[in-house]
Amino acid sequence: MQERKVLTELQINDRLLWPVLQTPSWWWPAVILASLVLGGGVTAVTLMVTLGLGVTGLNRPVFWGFMIVNFVFWVGISHAGVMISSILRLCQAEWRRPVTRAAEVLTVFSLATAALFPLIHMGRLWRFYWVFPYDFDRMLWPNVRSPLIWDPSAIFTYLTGASLFVFMALLPDMAILRDRTTGWKHTMYSITSLGWRGNPRQFKLQFILGILLSGLILPVFVSVHSIVSWDFAVSLVPAWHATVFAPYFVIGAVHSGVSGVVTMMVVLRTAFKWQDYITPDHFDALGRLLIAVATAWLYFFMLDVLFAIYGGETKEIAVMNQRIFSWPWGFFFFLIVVLGYIIPVGAWMFRSVRRNIMWMFFLSIIVNMSMWLERLWLIIPGLQNKERLTFNWSTYQPGIIEIMLVFSSFGLVCLGLLIFSKFFPLIPVWEEKEGQLFQAEIKIGNRTVPAIIRE
Amino acid sequence: MAITTVLGVYREPENVADAVSRLRQAGFGDNEFDILSGTPYPEGSFGEKVQAHRLYLWPLIGALIGFSIALLITAGTQLSFPMVTGGKPILAIPPMLIIMYEGTMLGAILFTVIGVIFESRLPRFSLGVYDARITQGYIGVIVACPQEKLGHTEQLLRESGADDIKKESGR
Amino acid sequence: MVVDIDRCTGCQACVIACQSENNQLLSTEDIVRQRRTMAWIRVERYWEGEFPNMKARFIPMLCQHCENAPCEPVCPVYATYHNNEGLNVQVYNRCVGTRYCAQNCPYHARVFNYWERSTDAPWREFFSSAQMVAEPMNEYLNPDVTVRTKGLMEKCTFCLQRIRRATRTAKNEDRQVKDGEFTTACAQACPTSAIVFGDMLDHNSKVAKKLTDARAFHVLEDLGTKPSVTYLKKVDPNAKPVAMEH
Amino acid sequence: MTAHTAQAGHAEHTGPHHVNPRPNLPEGPAALTKDVAERFAHPRLGALLVISGLMFLGGIAGVVMRISGGYEDRAAWGFYAAIFAWVLSTGCSAPILSVATRLTKGYWRKPLVRMTELFTVSTILLVLLFIPLMPAIPSVASHVSFWMTPASTPLEGGPQWALLLGVLGLMVCGLGLLYTSARADKAAIAEQSGGAAAAGGWGGTPNQWKVMRQGITYLGSFYLMFLIFVHLLVSIELAITLVPGWRDPIFPAFHAITGLQAGLATLIIMLAVMKRLGGYDQYLGLDQFWNPAKLLMAFTMLWFYFWWSAFIIFWYGRTPAEVGVLLATEFGPYLTPFVIGFVLNFVAPLLLLVWNPIRVSFNGPVVASVLIVIGNFFDRWRIYGGAFGVNPLGGHELPLDRIPMTRIPDLADLLVLLGALGGMVFFYLIASRIIPPISLWEVKEGQLLTRVQTLLRNTVTVIGKPE
């Protein structure tokens, strides 16, 4: 028994740390590809800054376009981390262990990426710091009544919390790396692991930290996407001015976020050969979670549509007409419902599908496609025919610039994840070991039932 | 008087528990020896006792500080820069609530993390006597023992099945 | 300000007057095709009835200087706010170009500087051939009005510079500003004087008299924005508020 | 969280070291069955049964008075509608806990699921309450409604029948759920008392067990969906459509969430009653109180979140329509009930429950629950009182001069209120005498799957997780 444990601890170290200790063959090509994609985005931003936003497809009245859509999308993805790690931690779901860190890291990078978009979509990017209350000598302040001030505060809080969460949970693993590396890496890990030695007190506090931070971040996580949704909901634009936006956005975010985590788990599993750590059981559990989430999402989606038509106000009806019956919005509507709910949930109903890695990969991708479209579908039509002054109604075609930006955002997130995976294990090693320790079996009759140890 | 830190490295958790009880018999207090492991064992697995901590104060203090700072910023900026926007009151409470909420949570989170680092006696600038095998499944028992007890302690650790013993004199 | 739709002939004089008074970026064909017209006031045309017996309806639309302006509270940097004359002012220097105000303006009254006015960047042509303010066109600029740069939101100011000048002269001769002493470019240029501008609080001003007219209405009244621009309905047996038409 | 985290997570003196976290039950299936059968044979709470029965009768009298008052004055029915919504939110929402914990396999659920499911009987009361209310619901022709019928073809009594179907469906699902999950225990108890005939064809074959589990899952999910659906219909037809200009997509969700909160609170109160007076003391440990208490705290936060999401939009938008709605239901004539509801539903419970020593105790959650159940009623009152007060209907916004007056409840209203309360208790107690309030088979299963082992120097519980 004990020998096996020692072996397993070594095995866990070897299996989970190999991407850090020796470089996977595909790592450099991946990094280069991601950087190239990112380069496109950098070029786009340069053009926008030098020539003005005219280079984009924006116009009057559609002043907000792909950039804001992408912002909402990435904030949505960033809701995976807390959803997974915090809620599962609080519920003490044993299967969470391999999933948590990947999810949290995804949160950090996608949130950072998202935070870039409102900035680069500003007319005068170089003045972005004016939204901070810094100007004490002239007493020029930001306007706290504006949702665009609520946004930074919320995103900053969430980003800080998530990053600290990741960092603290990394301490024991960085200690492991410290003991297994030499040279500058050893020095680096010695510093970053803060001299962790792993005595009972440290582990106990580490555990409490998990609980406390989860409890603290959950409310923040809800508030972040609510505030993002209020950017739209507090304005008078038809199809935006709906009270349901806050929970609707949050649940949509969870929907796309958890799907994003599924995608990421599949990639990790295959890329790092972690088959025996990320098992079909995990996908099964995530699939079941997703059924509930998707259904809740559909409920709010329906509420939104229903109340838009209800009351028969000309402006709302006009927007809804366009959203459901006109090309391409009608097609998008169809795609959103079919790809976002009907196909995936229909498939997740079957255990065999939930446990089939490739299926889960495919489904999580289409869910996120539909969620991206959903944000587009929510944000643009309301602007195209805002209010009843039909003289100003207009359409919106994204320019090459915006499309480059959208792609580059994916490049940025991938790049971040790749670099992180080179320095830190994407599966919490010490939590895996703890999980091993807490596994047990009990015999009932002729059957041995898998069991877990609770203090 | 000189204190030597002795580290015994074990393979078997069972032996560690044994060592702990022996150390108790040898008259070592709970804060004179400590256990280092790569895996979080359930609390008290080796019969050790973890001293109480005051972690629950930290988030509260943080929340209070964050709240008051946010209140200061939101109320202060609006009052010191009284511009009418959209017929809204100069001191608009609901938006303030949102930002104050975020400030509160930020303060709480920051102080929780600081609190945990502080309470777990980190950062630790020198590892002291340590063995890299600890993060590979071995378990270390680390004893701060005065000169005269040194020999006895080493023997005790060996008897309880330590694979290896390391020493470092002084604190 | 009062706009009498019945008198409006849709001659676009106001648009031109506004443009040259306020140094607007010339809305060249290219800019218009990009649907980024920079006019602060526009004459909206609505067709009524079926071909061949169609009838055009005109409504000049400009910033309504609402009392509960939706555009104001959403600005993160107070770049637009309500001054004590009840004007909805735009502070160009403070604007960072989030374009949130324009989103939230139900009247589409705000326009955005999508292009740098004068740049000789060669790749500029790739995106747009919009005319720059090159020699000798810069001669048309009005010295009283700022020239806005790229990335700024701008909108009708009720020709603030004229109001300021009037008040200044009045102050020098220490007396109250008289009605008709100042007016906006659009009102001045309107051949049928459909647009009348003045101080609503001064009860014997032309505007104040028209306010009590039975035909008076506000555009998109149900939004509760309380516009300062009052419209007078078209005298027409089957007239409905023009803004409600499609 | 579970006992584990509380112990780690909270100062030791409050942790479940000192109060037994798990119920201490007689060991072994036979002993369990015997014990439960014993208690079941001699139920307590007779006095409460009688009192609640009397209150129920009084309620019937109240309903009669209300009906004799006629339907011309819709405002008179506002309070009644509030009571109806309150029953929906408390008694009928309580069983959700058993559904949720079954789906998520919470191991602490086992002793309390049956007591939760017994609340499904209050759906009967819901139906009884609804029938007199039906004529008070205005016809669709008179106002903007969700039925999207042009005024020329009014859909007479559309809402009434849809709602009736909803509540009936809820009742069917609920009672079905109760029957399915209780079948095995009925059989066990019956055998205990010797009458195998009463087993009702239950043999306990593996197949039967499988079918039963499936049935519980499906019926439970249907019950949940039906409940959300009924909340949607009620909040729309009885509140939103009556107030012109009330375009508030979140309101049905708010109604449902607050309903779940109050349902949870109702359950906690009833658990306390059954523990202290009902004679099932040792079956309910601390786990069975503070796990629901944590959920209660979460729902208390959600109460504010859902209310705020609507409020901030209206506050910012300030269109005349929105101002009208706010005045009609919150800050106008019904300000007092609104404030009371706000304090009792959100402020007070949150302040109580965030404090660990209170949350991790037997009495703390109960106190919070009592506040919430009362507060929920005030909240419903301000909603439906305001909505029913609007007269005449129609229009796209509610001008200030049409804001309804406050309507003080009369004797009939109060009688109905007491009757509804009594009715819920009465039905529950009756049901608890027909069906054993402890889910025997699940408690046995729990005992089967829980072991106490020693890991090195400390003892741990091992919980088996089949499938």
Image (cartoon, coloured by chain):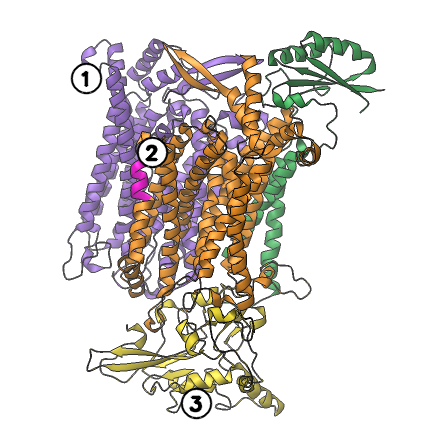
Q: What secondary structure is marked by label 2?
A: helix
Q: Name the residue under label 3.
A: C189
Q: Where is residue A397 in the image (x, y as percent from the top left)?
A: 39, 63
As displayed, is residue C49 above or below residue D280? below
**Residue sitting at 70 percent across and 12 percent down?**
B24
Q: Using the numbered discs, state the Cα–Cα distance from disc 2 to disc 1 in whole angstroms.
A: 27 Å
**Residue sitting at 31 percent across and 50 percent down?**
A335
A346 in the magenta segment: yes
Q: Which of the two discs, 2 and 1, labels the residue nearer the N terminus?
A: 2
* Quarter occupied by the C terminus of chain C: bottom left
As displayed, is residue D272 above or below residue A34? above
Q: Residue furthest top?
A: B159
Q: Residue D96 carries which label?
A: 2
Q: Using the numbered discs, state the Cα–Cα distance from disc 1 to disc 3 in whole angstroms.
A: 94 Å
D191 in the magenta segment: no
Q: Colour in which chain D is shown?
A: purple
Amino acid type at mark 2: Ile
C-beta proximity under 8 Å, tags 3 and 2: no
Q: Position of residue A92 (x, y in %)?
A: 47, 28
Q: Name the residue under label 1.
A: D200
Amino acid type at mark 3: Ala
Q: Using the numbered discs, state the Cα–Cα distance from disc 3 to disc 2 in whole angstroms.
A: 71 Å
Could you confirm whether marks 3 and 2 are on the same chain? no
Q: Colour in which chain C is shown?
A: yellow
Q: Where is residue D410 in the image (x, y as percent from the top left)?
A: 29, 48
Left or right: where A182 falls relative to A336: right
